[in-house]
Image (cartoon, grey):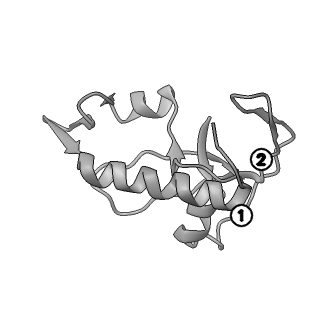
């Protein structure tokens, strides 16, 4: 399931979209239990390519904004190259890509880690 983090949900101002309750738990990389807030279906917006998705929303701090699962990547016919910091996807009759600025990415990651340390204190690793 695709996962959207609570902070991003708030920034997207999707308050008018109804929640669907979910009775499940997620387990983090170090065994912590996360209680999802529920699922939402953001609906259809005017984009170059639209796929209807359902997101599991979790209210925990994260350096990520969203986690897309393989079914979504397949629906977008997308390939992610973390080494090249690119997302490559097909658009009707052509292939397009999004190139990520490595310096900006590093800056955002460092700021997110600093914020997480401030919220939880101590080391994050």
Disc nearest the viewer among 2 and 1: 2
Q: Nearer the viewer, residue 114 or 13?
A: 114
Q: Is residue 23 left or right of residue 98?
A: right
Which residue occupies the extreme front position in the image? 122
The residue that appears at 50% across and 37% down in the rendered structure is 68
Rendered location of residue 35, percent (x, y) = 82, 45
Q: Split into 4 quadrants, where in the image is the C terminus?
A: top right
Is residue 100 visible in the rendered image? The answer is no
Mark 2 lies on a secondary structure that is loop
Label 2 to label 1, Cα distance in Å?
A: 15 Å
> Could you tell me how many numbered marks the image carries?
2
**69 on left or right of 102:** right
Instruction: Tell me: residue 97, above or below residue 8.
Output: above
Considering every residue shown, the one lying at the far right of the view is 23
Quarter of image, res 11: bottom right
- Asked which quadrant contains residue 89, the reply is top left
Residue 36: which disc?
2
Q: Residue furthest left?
A: 94
Q: Quadrant of the N terminus?
A: top right
Q: Residue at x 52, y 47 (%)?
A: 64
Residue 125 in view (yes/no): yes
Q: Horizontal placement of 74 versus 84: left or right?
A: right
**Residue visible at 65% across and 61% down in the picture:** 118
Mark 1 crowd level (few <14, some 14–19, many ≥20, 10 Å Cα): few
Residue 12 locus on image (x, y percent): 53, 68
User: Could you tell me which secondary element the residue under label 1 belongs to?
Assistant: loop
- Return the residue at label 1: 18
Between discs 2 and 1, the one toward the N terminus: 1
């Amino acid at each position: 399931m695709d996962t959207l983090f609570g902070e991003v949900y708030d920034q997207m101002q999707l308050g008018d979209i109804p929640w669907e309750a979910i009775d499940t738990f997620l387990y983090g990389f170090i065994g912590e239990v996360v209680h999802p807030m529920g699922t939402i279906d953001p609906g259809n917006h005017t984009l170059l390519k639209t796929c209807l998705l359902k997101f599991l929303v979790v209210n925990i701090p994260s350096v990520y904004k969203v986690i897309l699962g393989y079914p979504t990547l397949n629906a977008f016919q997308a390939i992610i190259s973390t080494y090249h910091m690119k997302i490559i996807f097909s658009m009707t009759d052509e292939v397009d890509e999004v190139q990520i600025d490595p310096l900006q990415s590093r800056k955002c990651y460092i700021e997110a880690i600093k914020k997480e340390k401030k919220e939880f204190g101590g080391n994050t690793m």
